[in-house]
Image: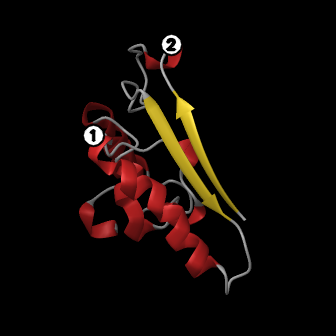
């Protein structure tokens, strides 16, 4: 089972705000989802990757935390999490991580590592 979900953005969520939610200037979001047995996931994952690849020329390369899957939450895939924030918001969030979680104990979520060494 696969889903491709295009969303039109804008309105109030697109207005500047004083918080860390990134990519507020995007005009559209595209989500893809694939469900199945472990043996089917490689084929379904390949399918789910096609729509984003086709619209890449128009992409901001930004991400939204609400649309990241479990495999995006692992530390090696930190780029997807980083792309969910504007650079000016990501830096202070990383400073909070450095101060309060320097060993990256709280990493089983959409983690922001305290340093490059904890990826």
Crowd band around label 2 with a 10 angstrom C-alpha radius: few (<14), some (14–19), many (20+): few
Disc 2 is placed on an element classified as loop
Give me the disc on residue 34.
Answer: none
Disc 1 is placed on an element classified as helix
Residue placed most toward the observer, 75 or 61: 61
Q: Point out residue 93 in the picture as x, y percentages from the top left corner.
A: 37, 40
Residue placed most toward the observer, 35 or 102: 35
What colouring method underlies this structural image? secondary structure
Q: Is residue 106 visible?
A: yes
Real-space CA distance between mark 2 and mark 1, rounded to the nearest whole angstrom: 27 Å
Q: Looking at the image, which residue is at 26% across and 68% down?
A: 117
Q: Is residue 48 left or right of residue 91?
A: right
Residue 102 vertical placement versus 92 (above, below) = below
Mark 2 or mark 1: which comes first in sequence? 2
Q: Residue furthest front?
A: 54
Residue placed most toward the observer, 118 or 35: 35
The residue that disc 2 covers is 11
Q: Point out residue 95 in the picture as x, y percentages from the top left corner.
A: 31, 43
Give me the disc on residue 91.
Answer: 1
Q: Point out residue 92 in the picture as x, y percentages from the top left corner.
A: 31, 36
| Quadrant housing residue 80 | bottom left
């Amino acid at each position: 089972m696969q889903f491709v979900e295009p969303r039109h953005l804008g309105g109030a969520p697109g207005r500047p705000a004083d918080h860390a939610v990134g990519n507020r200037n995007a005009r559209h979001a595209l989500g893809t989802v694939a469900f199945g047995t472990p043996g089917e996931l490689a084929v379904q994952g390949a399918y789910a990757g096609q729509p984003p690849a086709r619209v890449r020329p128009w992409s901001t390369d930004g991400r939204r935390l609400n649309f990241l899957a479990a495999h995006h939450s692992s530390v090696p895939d930190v780029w997807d999490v980083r792309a969910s924030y504007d650079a000016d918001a990501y830096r202070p969030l990383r400073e909070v991580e450095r101060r309060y979680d320097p060993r990256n104990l709280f990493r089983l979520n959409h983690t922001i590592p305290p340093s490059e060494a904890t990826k």
